[in-house]
Image (spheres, rainbow, N blue to C red):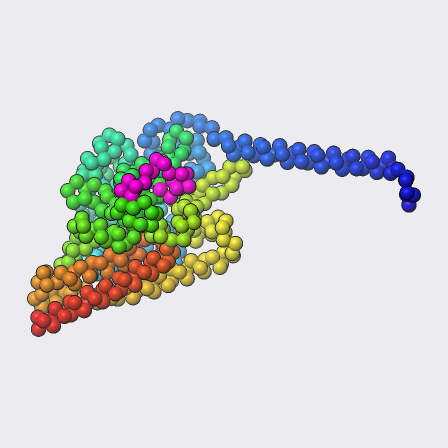
Amino acid sequence: MTRPGTRPRPAVWLLLIALFAAVGVAVGMLLTNIQQRHDEAATQPAQFVTIPDFETDPAVWGKNWPRQYDSFMKTKETGVRTPYAGNEPFDKLAANPLRKKFWAGYAFEVEYNEDRGHYYSLIDQREIRRVKERKQPGTCANCHSADVPRLINTMGWAKMNKTPYNDLNKTELHQGVSCGDCHSNKDMSLTITRPAFVNAMAKRGVDVKEATHQQMRTYVCAQCHVEYYFEKDSKELIFPWSESKKLEDGITIENISTYYQKDGHTDWNHTKTGGPMIKMQHPDYEMYSTGIHAKNGVACADCHMPYTREGAQKVSDHWVRSPLQNLNNACQTCHKSSSDELRNRVVTIQNRTRDMQASAEAAISDAIDAIVAAKDAGATPEQLKKAYDLHREAQLRWDFVDAESSMGFHSPQEATRALGHSADMARQAQLEATRLLNQQQ
C-alpha cells in the first residue's frame, strides 16, 4: 500500500500517459473520418460523360450516376402482388367486373390492367387495347414517354397534344419514363418538365420554381400521378384544380366535381343510361395531399423512393415500388414498429376501404339498373337529369378511390368520406329513377 504523501510509481505515470495518448489518437482518427465522410457526402459524383439535352436513354445517365441507374433498372422486375396492386399486370376488369358496367361506352371497358411500373410505362400504353382500338390524342404521351420534353421543344406543347397518338408513336416515341423526366442533365437536380403541372399549380398560387428540395420530391411525381382531362378541342392536358394556396384545398373530390360542373366537361355518355360521365385518372397526389403524411412534410419519394446509404452517400432508391415491398427503408425510418405490425396497419386500412368501396359499388350498380329501367319505360333525358347528376357524382367519388393507387392508405379518412358520399348519392339516384319509373307505369 502506498503511504500518504508517497508519489505514484513511474509505471503508473507511463500507463496514464499511454492511455491519454491512445484516447487522443482515437479521437483524432474519428474526427478525421467524420471530415472525410462529410467531404465525400458533399462532393458531387464525377461526370464522365456529358448528358445531352433531352437524352432519354437511362443507360447514358447511368455512366455518371450508376447507383441511381442500377436501382431504376429494377423497375423492370415484375410479378409481385400486394393485397390490392403490385407490379404484376393482372386484369382489373376480371378482378372487379362491375368496373365494366360502370364504364360502359368508355375506352376503359375494353381493357384495364394493373401497370407494371416505370420501365414499362410506354410499353404498356402501346400494347393496351384502349389505345390500339380507340383513337387517342398525343396528349396521352405526356406521362408515358421521356420523349415528351423533346417534342414540346421541337413541336410545341399545343401541337404535340393535338397530334394523333398513333402518329407520334410511329416515329417519335421511343422511351418510357426516364431520368430526364425529373432531373436536370447538368447536375441531377430535380426539375419539372410537364407544363400541365406548372399551369395547375399556378392556379393555386404556387410557383414551382420556388419549391424546396423536399417539396420537389413530391412535385416531380405529381406531374403525372394526378387526375386530369383533355380539353375538348385543343386536347390540352389540364388538371381540374381550383384556385387555393392551401395544400389540400382546391383538389378535393368536391373541388374537382365543382370544377367539372362549371367547365361543362364530360368524358363520355354512359351507353346503358345515356347520362354524361367523368372518368377519374389516378389522383394519387390529390388523395395524398389530404393525408397525415403530407401534413407532416413527408414526400412521395420518402416512402416510394426512400434514401439508402452507400458509404457516406445518401442515394434515393430509384426502384419505385410499393412501400409494402420495402418496409425497412420506407416505413421503419420513422415508425419504430416491426415489419409485421406495419404491414398489418396498412392492410387493415386497405381492407376497410375496400369494404366501404364494395358498399358504394352495390349502390351504383343498383342506380344504373334503376335508371335503365326508367329510361326503357319512357323517361326522357330531361326527366332523368337529376338521376343522371346523382349517378355521375356517386361514380365520380367511387372512382376517385378506385383509380387512386393506395386503396385508401394515402388518406384513409378522405377515402372513407368519399365512398360514404358515393353510396348515399347512388341510393338517391336509384330512388329518383324508381320514382320516374313508377310515373311511367
Measuring from the top left, give residue 127's x and y in whole percent: 26, 46
Asked if 242 appears above or below 34 in the picture, the reply is: below
Is residue 81 in view?
no
Q: Quadrant of residue 270?
A: bottom left
Asked if 164 appears above or below 295 in the picture, the reply is: above
Q: Quadrant of residue 121?
A: top left
Number of labels in the image equals: 0
**Which is nearer the eye, 201 or 372?**
201
Main secondary structure along the magenta-highlighted residues: helix
Measuring from the top left, give residue 115's x and y in whole percent: 32, 49
Q: Is residue 378 left or right of residue 352?
A: left
Is residue 401 in view?
yes
Residue occupying the point 21% across, 39% down = 161
Query: Magenta residues?
Result: 201-219
Q: Quadrant of the C terminus?
A: bottom left
Q: Residue 209: say if magenta.
A: yes
**Which is nearer the eye, 271 or 62?**
271
Measuring from the top left, give residue 135's x and y in whole percent: 17, 45
Residue occupying the point 86% across, 35% down = 10
**Which is nearer the eye, 301 or 296?**
296
Q: Quadrant of residue 76?
A: top left
Q: Is residue 62 left or right of residue 385?
A: right
Residue occupying the point 12% across, 70% down = 437
Q: Residue 243: say if magenta.
A: no
Measuring from the top left, give residue 131's x and y in whole percent: 22, 46
Residue occupying the point 43% across, 53% down = 324
Q: Quadrant of the N terminus?
A: top right
